[in-house]
Image (spheres, rainbow, N blue to C red):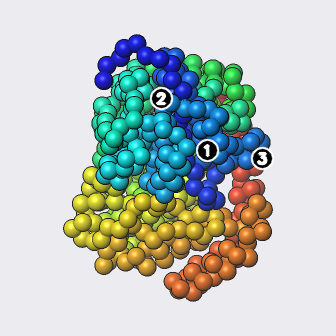
Amino acid sequence: MTSHEFKKKRVLFINPAKEDTFIVNRIHMGLTLLGEILSVNGHEVLIMDYAFLRSIQGKLEIPNISDLVKDFKPEIIGISCFTYLYDECQCMVDEISQCSNAPIILGGPHITFFPEDFMNDKRVSYLVRGEAESIILDLVNDAKPQPMPVIIKCLHPCAEEIPAINLDIAYGSQYLRTYQIQLSRGCPFSCSFCNIELIAGKKVRARNLELCIEQIVTAKKHYPNINNITITDDCPTFNMKRFKQFLTMFAKTNIDTTLSIDNVRADLIDEEILQLYVKAGGQNVCLGTESGNLQVFSLVNKGESLEEIINAAKLIRKYNLEFGLCFVIGLPEDTLEKHRDSIKLAKYLNVDYAYWNMCTPWPGTKIETWFRQNGEIGDVRNFSTLIDSGVNFKNPPAWSTSFTMDERIKAWLMANLETYTLPIIFWGNLRYLPRNMLKLFKLARQHNLYKSLFIYINGFAFHQIYLTLQNRRRLYLLQKTKTELK
């Protein structure tokens, strides 16, 4: 495709939502980036992020798809498809195709990994695989209904091609409280379970920090409800000197927001980074740990050690930051017994929160190869790697004779119960408490988890009180430390 004169088009971008208990407090960043490219080139763009809109229900009217299509009359419709939302994407495509003849473009991670799911779908005109910044304008300019889907494989855009986020075109953005920013894309590491290398590549594309700071300040100015800036890089501290520079620049803006980081490597933080992070309004650090068992951990190929994670955790605690760990259950050579080491590590480090993700063998990853040789792979479509507060989950998408499907479910429940990360008991969920507790009792009986359930029931309320008091103390000490560092 080549750029040429084109008529202004109305473009509708959609991010579907799943009816579960997870709360999404962010607007789909990828769609806001693509929308910005189209908007500055004259197209009229509307983003409907139904996942985000679920979090602000009651604050504004949220139109359904058929009414939206009737009113907006889009000439092109793009849908972001996550594997977790596969069924919702199918339903969305079906509903749209019944009320509009506009060409449908599907993109997102699921299309990158599983294009075959829609290759013969006559309802769809284009399948976009990979990061679309460098092709979206030409695609929209030239788009027309196709008899069969046209597959477009994208090259990684250079850092200069990544635009600013455009919130003006996102429905409900006036209620947004968390603003996302990418200082870079790509990760130079090769963790066995991770698919980032296949999406964003190993080469890190570092964006201009001055431009990033300018975009943050502008967003806060135009959207005063924003109270948190979240860095969503694949590997935010890949260059520690550069990240320190960003923190210094951010602190000087004096904008009234907190700062968060989605994920950090233990071997790429030091005391100076934490000091600068606190001065900049930093609130939390979550370390990717994957497994507390030395043998399983070594096979992840992270390029760091458990000792480095433990040392980093102690340093994070020193600066009174909220501290979390991210685990993956069921990695190669993992077993139910080895999994207990992860729970022990979480308890030993006294985490404020933990993510217990179920291992998912994404196509092209090293663990996919391992499971094909040593285990079984089921269907990853519609699978969430976390258990929600309604105790809802799907069966693990991979298993082995040494760590069976039932054992993986048991390990999943055990970890969530014993670290109090299954939030079925909280004020906003009280009306569903009897139903959820009954479900939990049945699961405990089925998987012989009476001890874990006892720990959860007896300790959850005290744990929540402890966390509340600790959080107040932490915020006080954090503010005190921030003042002292200045």
N-terminal label among 3 and 1? 3
Relative height, residue 441 to residue 413 (above, below): below
Apparent side of residue 316 relative to residue 238 in the rendered image (left or right): right
> What residue is pinned by disc 1?
66
Q: Residue visible at 73% across and 72% down?
A: 433
Q: Which mark is residue 167?
A: none
Q: Which mark is residue 34?
A: 2
Measured Cα–Cα span from mark 3 to mark 1:
20 Å
Residue toward you, 425 or 38: 38
Residue toward you, 258 or 33: 33
Relative height, residue 410 to residue 106 (above, below): below
Residue toward you, 338 or 103: 103
Q: Amino acid at mark 2?
A: Leu
Label 3 or label 1, whichever lies nearer to me, is 1
Task: Indicate the quadrant where residue 27 lies.
Answer: top right
Q: Secondary structure at mark 1?
A: helix
Q: Amino acid at mark 3?
A: Gly
| Dot 3 alpha-carbon crowd within 10 angstroms: few under 14, some 14 to 19, many 20 or more | few
Q: Position of residue 429 (x, y in %)?
A: 74, 64
Q: Residue visible at 53% across and 85% down?
A: 446
Q: Residue visible at 36% across and 76% down?
A: 403
